[in-house]
Image (spheres, rainbow, N blue to C red):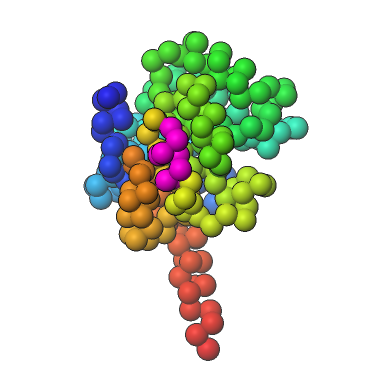
Amino acid sequence: MNHILQQIKGGLIVSCQALEDEPLHSSFIMARMAVAAQEGGAVGIRANSVADIREIKESVKLPLIGIVKTQYPGTDVFITPTRKEVDDLAAVGAEIIAMDATGRKRPGNVSLDDFFKEIRRDYPQQLFMADCSTLEEGIHADRIGFDIIGTTLAGYTPYTEHIKVPNLELIRQLRERTDKPIIAEGGIWSGADLQQTFRCGAFSAVIGAAITRPQLITKYYVKSIENLG
């Protein structure tokens, strides 16, 4: 097994991300978040943007799942959507590069198959993670050569918005139908949620909002007392 995969097997990956309109948007703050995650026992970090990844890699020695979130006209795909983002992530040394692996067209009306065929040809040794929302997408990503399948987009595509997350059944089905490591991501808010993802066959799991987005953590607790009367 690839040594990077061995490092993250059976452990928790912490997503350290803050978008431009969020209170903690800062490469320095995200790097400190990553240090805190490392001290807490995380086995890896997921991060967005070259600036954040560069600073995080200078601060911790954990394997990093890198993405670049950017919007292009005419497409809903925004997680590492084009060759430029892949090249940038490879240059900054992201051990794993994650991207949208849904069936939706990418910028320029490019299909996932055509896009990934070129990427895999040019980066044969790079680990790639498929951010999927359905079983069919995960199976397809496995077939075209992704190294890791993630449930990242389950509940976040228009055709899965009705799905409760974490989608434990999706994790279970992907584990049964593919031979690639399954990373559970999305909607994990408690230790019980996390344990369930591993019981369903997750190779490792990513938690973001419940650890590194204090505005959402606060909202979660405020909502829990709203109807006490």
**Extreme residue in the top direction:** 122
**Extreme residue in the bottom direction:** 229
Query: Does 96 sit left or right of 165 as displayed?
Result: left
Q: Is 196 colored magenta in this rendering?
A: no
Q: Residue at x 48, y 46 (%)?
A: 170
| Whole-percent x, y for residue 87 in the image | 51, 18
In the displayed structure, would residue 7 be above or below residue 187?
A: above
**Extreme residue in the right direction:** 74
Q: Residue at x 39, y 30 (%)?
A: 179
**Extreme residue in the front direction:** 176
**Could you tell me which quadrant the N terminus lies in?**
top left
Note whether residue 17 is visible: no
Give the magenta part as a residue range: 171-178
| Whole-percent x, y for residue 164 in the image | 54, 57
Which residue is more in the foreground, 1 or 214? 1
Query: Does 137 sit left or right of 89 as displayed?
Result: right
Q: Residue at x 61, y 49 (%)?
A: 160
| Whole-percent x, y for residue 188 in the image | 42, 55
Task: Give the overall secondary structure of the magenta segment.
Answer: helix
Q: Is 174 colored magenta in this rendering?
A: yes
Which residue is more in the foreground, 133 or 221? 133
Query: Does 42 sit left or right of 108 as displayed?
Result: left
| Whole-percent x, y for residue 3 in the image | 26, 25
Q: Residue at x 63, y 45 (%)?
A: 157
Which residue is more in the foreground, 56 or 108? 108
